[in-house]
Structures are given as C-alpha cells and as structure tokens.
C-alpha cells in the first residue's frame, strides 16, 4: 500500500504505529489545511513545514480528530474500512511526529 | 477510496489549486545594483502597485489559502508601506518572508521584527568576505549586510536566514558561509544563479564550474539543514536527491508577481513569453493562476526532448526552464549547467545574438561625470 502522506525531505514513517487508538488528538491550531485534488496540503506556520496528505479520507479524519475523545472514535465516525485503520493510525503517528496534529493535553496552550 | 497511486511529483506537475507560496517583488527600487539582479532593479516605477492594490491582492491570496509569500524587489524595505504590507499578510494568516540587503535594518527595526510572529527575514550576501561580496553587490554592501545580521541577532530575532546565490567565486567559501551563519544563530540558504535580468550577462562569468557543482552537491547532501529553496534540482542527476520537491514549480506550485502586478511563471523568467497576466485583470490573481493559457500549458506533460535518451532525466527533469531560455537553449533540451556535461556543447553551438533579451528593466544609468 502506498503512503498516505509525504513529508518532503523526510521519508514517511512506515514502521509500527505507537498506540494511538485511545488517544485524543487534534489538528495543530498553527496548521493551515488546504484541499487539493490529491488530498490536502498542510502548512505549519510555526515550523514552516509543508506536508502532503494524499487521501481524502485522511484529510477528513485529520479535520475531525479534535471532535472526538479518541482516535478510533474519529475513525469510526468516518467512512474508513476497519481493515485500513492500522495504516491510518500509522499516518497519524507520522503527522503527530511532524507536528501537524497534536495531543491537546500534552501541550497546554503555548504559542 | 484507497490512497492515490501516482507519484506526488506527477500530481504537482499538473498544478495545484493555488500556489504553495509565491514570490512578490514589491518594487524595482534598490540602493544597490547587483550584477546578477534577476529583475534589473534600480529605480522605482511610477506604475508600481499602490498600497490599496497590494492589500486587495493580499485578500485574494488569503481566500486562495496561499501559505506564505516571499517578498522581495528591488529592496522591498524602501517602500514606505513595506511593514504595513508585512503586517497585512500576517493578519490574513499568510506567512511573510522577505529578502533584504540589510540597509534599512536598524536596531529598532530588528527589535520590532523580533516581536512579530510568522515573519522570516533573509539577508542577502554573495561572498563570505567584503572583496568577494562587493564585487557582485557593490562597495560597502558586505559591511551593511553583516551589520543587519548583528542587529537581528542582538534583538533576539531567532534563526533568520543568510541567503547566498552560488557563483564560481563563492563556492570555495561554503564553509565560511556556514561559519558566518552559525555565528549569528542563522540558517544558511543557498540558491542557484540564474541568467535572468542583469544576470543574463553576468551569468557567463559567474556561473559555477561543473567541478564546483559536484562539490556543492556533496556539501549539501552532508547538510540537510542548509536551505536551498528547491533551487538545485538539476544536481539530482548526480544521484542522491536533495531535500525538497525536486521539480520545476513554475506556474504549477509557485509563481511571481512583479511590482506592477504582472504575474510570471517564476522569479527567473521576467520576459513577455512567460507573463501569464496581471493581478489587475478582471478576475484578479485567481483567474490568472487558474486559467491563464501560459499556466495551463505549463501543467501539461512536458516532452523530455533531447534529454529523452538520458538515464538521469527522471532525476533532473531537464533542469531549469529559465536557465535554458535566457541562454538560448531549447526548453526541451539539457540545462546549460547539466551536471553530465550535456549543456556545454549546446551552449557552444548557440549564437549570442539569438539569445532572448530580458526586459529593459529599471537599472540606474551609469553616470560618467559629476556636475
């Protein structure tokens, strides 16, 4: 399966995902998300990093993460087939590592 | 519903709904007269966009969700409304990066910049010492730039950028540029010399030798933290792609707005042939980006032409359109600085008179006498 996202200059993490299923995550407020035919571009105004999200389902998931208390509830609310959840969790792990999404509790309102 | 199968580069070549970023030259005015100036700057043009016109375009870029703009010139900071423009961008969620020769960067200005989020500053030098730099940028320009860097560092601005155009005279100074940037806690940014503007003439004696290009490539591979603005994708033919998108983004993911509001495919092709339209046209910038015949054609699959039989075409994509254009080479042939040496015979076969000339520009005439 192809990667769901591409981080220029930095190979997408493809290993085992850390346990994300039960965590609460959200789009970082400093990230601008722009729809594109292939999915979306995400630009982080703080780190100045550009990330390519290459699936409409991933874009929908990232946009709605913050509305759900757990990652898997966000997955369940979308239309991603359960068999694909592991690959989506891996993509989220890479997005967490690159700062596109964040754990709201791990970073209490700092600029 | 599965992820898309095509390589990202194919999708980018078909063009984005809006640019990722764009270069916006706000004025032709400049107190320097660098020999390689892409825009042949010097005098301001009375037809430069007014503050209100600039603000209107910023509103459009906001609606298009353009992530950031690279403000330049000329020397953009000589516009009296320059920092109003920066503030307007930031207020609209558009990151503002600007290039400056440092001449207006006082300690007070550096302090104000340090207090502004989402602003990046690039101070340009073209040599690691005054002799090398000033030969290209003019007497005193090195000292001025270093003073500006001192002010930024003292104000606690953070990692500003030291921006250098690579020439055959400064590639031997790469380690010294790195040391200079480190001294100020700055990031080094290296970009490619293009034969555009006044650089159309200067390129012939300033562009790096092939051995220097190989050295630069190896040096950059060892230093992924050095920024290049995706400038050196033609070096990918050496094997080992540099960080970045590694493709020509002209009219696909980037473009340029000139001081008069004319929109060009990239900062290096200020020539009628690559003018897509104007922000003042009906429909504004968005219409030019989406539907100008030039940009639509740049998003069509390109022929590899004379490079089709070269095994490195997929890596270098034939190099830089602007470098080919202004050196008189066919756009579907090798880059004049092809690292595999295919550019040199092509250059040798061309007649100088057949090369396209850049627009006359805004160079300040040389005065031979004093009154």
Image (spheres, coloured by chain):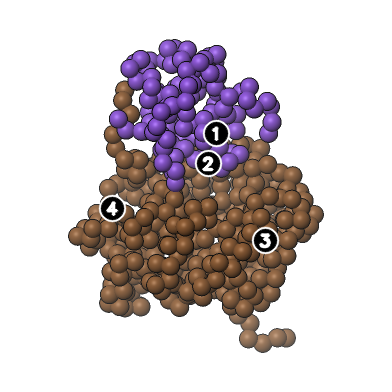
Chain colours: A purple, B brown
Say which residue label 1 marks.
Answer: A99
Q: How far, Cα to Cα, is label 3 from label 4?
A: 39 Å
The residue lying toward the viewer, choosing from B4 and B11, is B4
Mark 3: few, some, or many residues within 10 Å (few <14, many ≥20)? few
Say which residue label 3 marks.
Answer: B183
Q: Residue furthest right?
A: B108
Viewer-nearest of labels 2 and 3? 3
Q: Quadrant of the N terminus of chain A?
A: top left
Q: Quadrant of the C terminus of chain A?
A: top right
The residue lying toward the viewer, choosing from B315 and B298, is B315
Check whether the beta carbons of the residues at disc 1 and disc 4 lie within 8 A of each other. Answer: no
Residue B73 visible (yes or no): no
The answer to whether marks 3 and 4 sit on the same chain is: yes
Q: How far, Cα to Cα, is label 1 from label 4?
A: 31 Å
Q: Residue furthest left?
A: B309
Q: Chain of mark 3?
A: B
Say which residue label 2 marks.
Answer: A49
Q: Secondary structure at mark 1?
A: loop
Q: Secondary structure at mark 2?
A: strand
Q: Which badge, 3 or 4, is on the more N-terminal residue?
A: 3
Q: Secondary structure at mark 4?
A: helix
Q: How far, Cα to Cα, is label 4 from label 2?
A: 25 Å
Q: Is residue B342 above or below residue B278?
A: below
Say which residue label 4 marks.
Answer: B314
């Amino acid at each position: 399966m192809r990667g769901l996202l591409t981080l220029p200059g930095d190979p997408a993490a493809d290993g085992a995902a850390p346990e994300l299923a039960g965590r609460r995550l959200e789009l970082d407020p400093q990230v601008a998300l722009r729809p594109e035919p292939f999915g979306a571009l995400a630009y982080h105004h703080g780190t100045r990093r550009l990330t390519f999200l290459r699936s409409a389902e991933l874009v929908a998931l990232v946009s709605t993460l913050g509305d759900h208390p757990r990652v898997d509830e966000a997955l369940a609310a979308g239309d991603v087939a359960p068999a694909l959840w592991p690959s989506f969790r891996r993509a989220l792990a890479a997005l967490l590592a690159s700062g596109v999404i964040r754990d709201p509790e791990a970073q209490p309102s700092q600029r | 519903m599965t992820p898309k199968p095509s390589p990202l580069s194919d999708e980018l070549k078909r063009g984005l709904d809006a640019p990722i970023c764009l270069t916006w030259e706000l004025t032709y005015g400049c107190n320097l007269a660098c020999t390689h100036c892409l825009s042949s700057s010097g005098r301001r043009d009375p037809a430069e966009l007014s503050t209100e016109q600039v603000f209107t375009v910023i509103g459009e870029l906001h609606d298009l969700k353009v992530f950031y703009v690279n403000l330049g010139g000329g020397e953009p900071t000589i516009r009296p409304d320059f920092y109003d423009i920066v503030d307007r961008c930031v207020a609209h969620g558009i990151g503002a990066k600007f290039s400056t020769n440092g001449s207006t960067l006082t300690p007070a200005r550096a302090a104000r910049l340090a207090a502004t989020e989402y602003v990046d500053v690039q101070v340009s030098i073209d040599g690691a010492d005054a002799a090398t730099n000033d030969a290209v940028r003019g007497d005193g320009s090195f000292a001025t730039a270093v003073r500006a860097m001192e002010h930024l560092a003292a104000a606690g601005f953070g990692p500003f950028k030291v921006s250098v155009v690579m020439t055959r005279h400064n590639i031997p100074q790469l380690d010294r540029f790195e040391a200079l940037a480190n001294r100020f806690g700055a990031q080094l940014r290296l970009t490619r010399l293009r034969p555009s503007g006044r650089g159309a003439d200067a390129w012939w004696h300033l562009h790096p030798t092939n051995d220097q290009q190989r050295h630069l490539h190896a040096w950059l591979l060892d230093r992924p933290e050095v920024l290049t603005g995706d400038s050196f994708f033609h070096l990918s033919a050496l094997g080992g792609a540099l960080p970045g998108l590694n493709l020509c983004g002209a009219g696909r993911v980037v473009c340029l707005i000139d001081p008069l509001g004319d929109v060009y495919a990239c900062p290096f092709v200020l020539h009628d042939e690559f003018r897509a339209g104007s922000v003042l046209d009906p429909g504004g910038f968005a219409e030019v980006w989406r539907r100008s015949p030039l940009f639509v054609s740049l998003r069509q699959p390109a022929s590899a032409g004379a490079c089709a039989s070269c095994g490195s075409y997929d890596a270098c994509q034939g190099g830089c359109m602007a470098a080919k254009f202004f050196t008189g080479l066919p756009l579907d042939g090798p880059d004049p600085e092809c690292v595999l040496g295919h550019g040199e015979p092509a250059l040798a076969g061309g007649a100088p008179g057949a090369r396209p000339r850049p627009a006359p520009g805004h160079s300040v005439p040389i005065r031979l006498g004093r009154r």
